[in-house]
Image: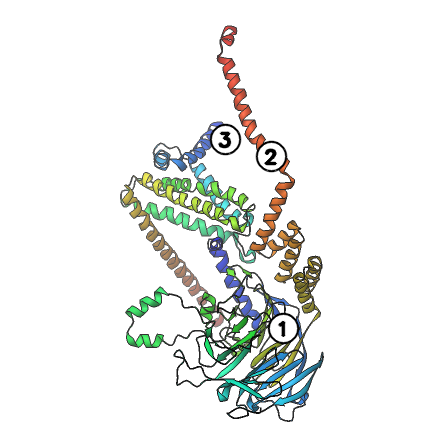
Amino acid sequence: MFAALTSKENWQRYFKSLKFSLYCLTHPIDGFWDLTHEKRGSYAAANTILFLAVAAYVLRLRYTSFIFIQVYWEDLNVFTYIASVLFPFFLFVIGNWALTTLFDGKGRLGQVYIATCYALTPYPLIQFPLMFLSNYITVDEAEFYSALYTIAIVWVLFIGIFGMSQVHEYSFGKNILFLIATIFAMLVMIFLLMLFFSMVSQGVAYFISLFKEMLYRL
Amino acid sequence: MRKGFTKICALAISAGMFFASSISGYATTIDRSYTYNYDYWGDVQDSPDMYSVCKVFTSTELGLEKKLSSPQGVYVKDNFIYVLDTGNNRILEFERTARESIEYVREITSFTGGTGPDTFSSPTDIAISDEGNIFIADKGNARILKLDSNLNYIMEFTKPIDNSIDKDIVYQPSKIAVDSAERVYCVAAGINKGLIKYEADGSFTGFVGATPVVFDFKMYLMKKIATQEQLNKMESFVPTEYDNLYMDKEGFIYACTGNVEAEDLRGGDADAIRRINPLGDDILIRNGVYYDGKFPIYGDLYMGNGGGYSGPSKFADVTVFDNDSYVCLDRNRGRLFGYDDQGRMIFVFGGAGNMDGYFREPLGLEHMDYDLIVVDRLDCTITLFTLTDFGQLVFDAMDQFDNGEYGKSGKTWREVMKYNGNYDLAYIGLGRAYLRQKEYGEAMDYFKLKYDDENYSKAYKKYRKEYVEDHIFIIVVVLLALFLIPLGIGKVKAIKREFLISDAFKYNN
C-alpha cells in the first residue's frame, strides 16, 4: 500500500487527473466524455474534490464575514452539517445510477460518482477566495458576494447536467428527464430508509419491552 | 438579499430557532429574572433590573375618600399627574412633590357652561394643550370636551358627520392627543380607519395613520372563487383599530394597538406600534438587528401559553421619552417594553401578578423624565417606577451620545457592561461611540460581537479608506511589482530566446 504512495508515477497520474477537473470546468461536454471514456479521471482526484467541497462548505461558516453568514454556534453540530450535504450527494449518486442503469444509461456507479464529484469543482474553487474576499467588503458591496456565490452554484449545476448526459450517453432531453426522475428516486430512498429505521426501532422496542416484562414477572 | 444566505445554512438556523423557543418556554415557567432582554438570536437574556418599584399608590395612600374605580388612563403634564377614574366619572389631579410622594390636588367632576350635561360619563382620557386648555374624552357622552384651565366650557368635538362613518354606530371617543395648534387626534371604539383628526375649530378633516391597503394576489384569487358564504366570513377581517396614542414633543403621534394576531405580526402584515407623521405615514425606525432581518417591535417574541396567558403582547399604552426612546405597555402579560430611537430593545420587565411591580390589567402608562407611572384598572393602583443605577447608566450613556459626548458615552457603556455583559445595546453603543471618535478598528470589534452589520460596514469603510491612505506607497509598489516583475521575466526570457536562436550562438555550437 505504501509502495503505491511512494510511486512517482501514481502521483503524476493523480495530479494529472486532478488537473483535468479544471478542463471540465470550461469544456463540460468534451471533458466529461473523456473523463469516463478515456479514463482521464480518477477516484483519488474525485475524492479530493469532494473533500475540498465539503471543507469549503464547513469552513465558510467560520471564515466568511458575519455580514453574510450568521451562525448560531451553540447549536451547530458539524457532523450533522456535513451530513446535510454528503447524504443528499450520495443519495443522488446512487439514485441516479439505480435509475439510469434500468434505462440503458452507460455510466457505472463509479463513473457517476467520479463525474458528480468533478462537477463540484467550481464550488471550492470560488468559495475559498470568496471566504477571503467577504472579509474585505461592506454591506453595500454585498452584491459582489451574492453574485459570485450564485455563479458557483449555477456553474456546478450546469456542468453537472452536461456531465451526466455524457456519462450515460443520453440526449439532452432524456438527461433532464432522468435528472428530475432522480429527485423522485431520492425521495423514494429517503422514504424507504425512514421506513426501515422506524421498523427496526419498533422491533428493538418490542424486544426491550419483552425483556422488561420478563424481568417484572420472574 | 444578503440575509437570504442565512437560508443556505437553514439547518443551523432552524435548529437555532427551535433551541431559542425551547429556552424561552423553559424560562417563563421557571426562573426568569424580572427584567430581561432579547439578544441578536432572539434568545432571552436575563438582565439586572433597570427599573424598580418606587412606590405603589392605592386609594388609601393617595388620600382619597372615594376609592378609585376601574381607572383607565393616566396623563402627565409637568409635575401634575391626571388619573382617569373612569368608574367614578371623575378625573383626579395629583402633584408629584418628591421622588416618592404624590399628593392629591383636586378632582374634576363637572364643568360650567355648555349645552349638554355638565358632568362626565366614563371619561377615558385627558390631554392638556400648550395654552393650558383641557381636553377630555367623555366617552359615555360621545363627545370630546375642550375646557379652559378653570373648567369653563369652550367647545366640544362630536361625532364626525361623514360618509365614511356608519351613522348608526355609537360614537365612543376613548383616547385623545392634542398638538401644538390644538388639533385633536382621537381613537374611538369601533372605528378602524385610523385616528380621527379634528381641526382646532372642531371640523373633522379625515383619518390619519390607517393601515395601508396592499394588493394581495391570494386574497384576489380567493374572492374570485369563494362562495358568498365564504366571502361573508372573510369580511370579518378588520383593519387596525388603535388602542392608544401618544404625541411626542416633536408632534409625531405614536399609536399602538393590541388588536393584532401573532401570525400577522410575525409575517410583518401588522404593526403593534406606529409613529405617524402629519401625512399619516408610519415613520417608526426599525433598525434593530436580528438574525432574520430587522428586530420586530411587537413585545414578546415568544408567545407561549404559560400561566393562562396566550397570544402576542397587546399594547394598551405607549409613552415616549425626550430622547425618542419609547415604552410600550402590554396589558396581556403586564409587561413594559422599552425601545430606543433605532427600534432596538432596551428592556422588558414586569409580569402578571399581585406583587408590587406586577399587574393584573394595566391600561395607562406615562413618564415623568425617566420615571414611569402605570395605572392598573383591576388593582386600582398607581405604580411609580424609578431607574436603578443600571438603568440610570443606560439612559446616561444614550443622552451623552445624543449630546455629542462620545468619549463619555463610551465610558458609560463600559460601566453598563460591567452590570450586564449580555446586553447587546451596550456593545453596539460602545461601538457607535468608538465610531464617532474615529477609532474604527475598535468600533468594528464591538459591532462584530453583536452582529451589527450596518454599523460594522460604516466603520469598516472608514477603516479601509484610512488604511489605504496610510499605506498608499506600499500598495502602489506592490501593484507595480505585480505588473512589472512578470513583464520583466517575460522580457528576459524573450532576450534569452533571441540569443539562443541567434547566429552567433549557432557558430559557437
**Closer to the camera in the image, B370 or B110:** B110
- Image x and y of residue B231, in percent: 32, 74
Q: Which mark is residue A3?
A: 3
Left or right: B470, with B196 as reference point: right
Q: Secondary structure at mark 2?
A: helix
Snapshot quadrant of residue A13: top left
Q: Amino acid at mark 3?
A: Ala
Q: Is the image coloured rainbow, by chain, by secondary structure, or in one colour? A: rainbow
**Letter of the chain that mark 1 sits on in the rendering:** B
Q: Which mark is residue B476?
A: 2
Instruction: Work out whether B221 lies above or below B498.
Output: below
Neighbor class of circle 1 (other Cα within 10 Å; few <14, some 14-19, many 20+) is some
Q: Nearer the viewer, mark 2 or mark 1?
A: 2
**Closer to the camera in the image, B276 or B497:** B276
Which residue extends farthest top? Answer: B507
Write down the residue under mark 1.
B34
Residue in the picture at 34% in, 51% down = A183
In this orientation, does residue B176 appear? Answer: yes
- Image x and y of residue B19, in percent: 53, 63
**Letter of the chain that mark 2 sits on in the rendering:** B
Q: Amino acid at mark 1?
A: Tyr
- Image x and y of residue B221, in percent: 31, 66
Distance (Cα) linking label 3 and label 1 = 69 Å
Q: Nearer the viewer, mark 3 or mark 2?
A: 2
Q: Amino acid at mark 2?
A: Val
Q: Nearer the viewer, mark 3 or mark 1?
A: 1
